[in-house]
Image (cartoon, rainbow, N blue to C red):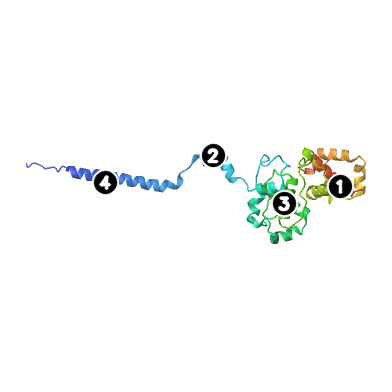
Amino acid sequence: MGSENKAVPSGGAITIILGAIVILVAGVWLLAKLATSGFSIDASVMSKEAIASRIKPVGESKASEGGAPGSRTGEGVYKAICASCHNDGLAGAPKFADTGAWSARLAQGYDTLVKHAIEGIRGMPAKGGATDLTNEEVARAVAYMGNAAGAKFTEPAVAGAEGGGAAAAIDPNVKGKEIYASVCMACHDTGAAGAPKFGDKAAWAPRVSKGLDALVASGIKGLNAMPAKGGYSGSDEEFRAAVEYMVNASK
């Protein structure tokens, strides 16, 4: 029988084969890298804190930012909250200092504008989404924006900002009226839930006979269907101004 010859790859052929294998492996690696490049995840951006920050509603703020609740000025509230929409007119918001956009709104009056800002209107959520704002802080922001567009609103004073730290006197015909229009009127305009109607002398007479101090004290704690301060989130002194305003209207 004849001998069987087996071909043995030469050194050059082995080099070519190994090179092809390396190229094939590299190609597979590059394809895998390309296919998964969009799925790279940075753990730092997936933390609970980072996610909460990204989904936080527009306008949300903390009471610690810019001072204690009730102490922020109209300008401060505008820059921290309102500017997010009013600077560029987002969601139909009238742009800051745009007299044309504000004219029809200013014609409605300060009390109406404050009420709309506190309760929310159209694309704007209540208090611009900053639920920690007090009603008087919202009122200051409204005055600040309105005045920038040509109004002459009086921005509610910050208690303790004048007289070297002593709280400024609160005028019931100004501040009391403002609070009534934004909070108290919800029940006292119609007599809802047993509330004495605004200006109804007969309904207010037995209450007035107790004295202003007693009325304020019971109102601060809440009475019958009325929650504490009627739901007002401002100071006791400001709430007193609202009670005095209603009492004066019933005399």
**Closer to the observer: label 1 or label 4?**
1
**Rendering coords of residue 101 (x, y %):** 69, 60
The answer to whether the residue labelled 4 contacts the one labelled 3, judged by CB atoms less than 8 Å apart, is: no
Say whether residue 141 is left or right of residue 220: left
Say whether residue 196 is left or right of residue 28: right
Numbered badge on residue 226? none
Q: Residue at x 64, y 54 (%)?
A: 87
Reading the image, the residue beneath label 3 is 144
Q: Which quarter shows the N terminus?
A: top left
Say whether residue 12 is left or right of residue 75: left
The answer to whether the residue labelled 1 contacts the one labelled 4, judged by CB atoms less than 8 Å apart, is: no
Q: Amino acid at mark 4?
A: Ala
Numbered badge on residue 246? 1
Reading the image, the residue beneath label 2 is 47
The residue furthest front is: 164
* Distance Cα–Cα, label 3 vs label 2: 38 Å
**Closer to the observer: label 1 or label 3?**
3
**Closer to the observer: label 4 or label 3?**
3
Q: Amino acid at mark 3?
A: Tyr
* N-term-proximal mark, 3 vs 2: 2
**Rendering coords of residue 140 (x, y %):** 74, 48
The answer to whether the residue labelled 1 contacts the one labelled 3, judged by CB atoms less than 8 Å apart, is: no
Numbered badge on residue 20? 4
The answer to whether the residue labelled 4 contacts the one labelled 2, judged by CB atoms less than 8 Å apart, is: no
* Distance Cα–Cα, label 4 vs label 3: 74 Å
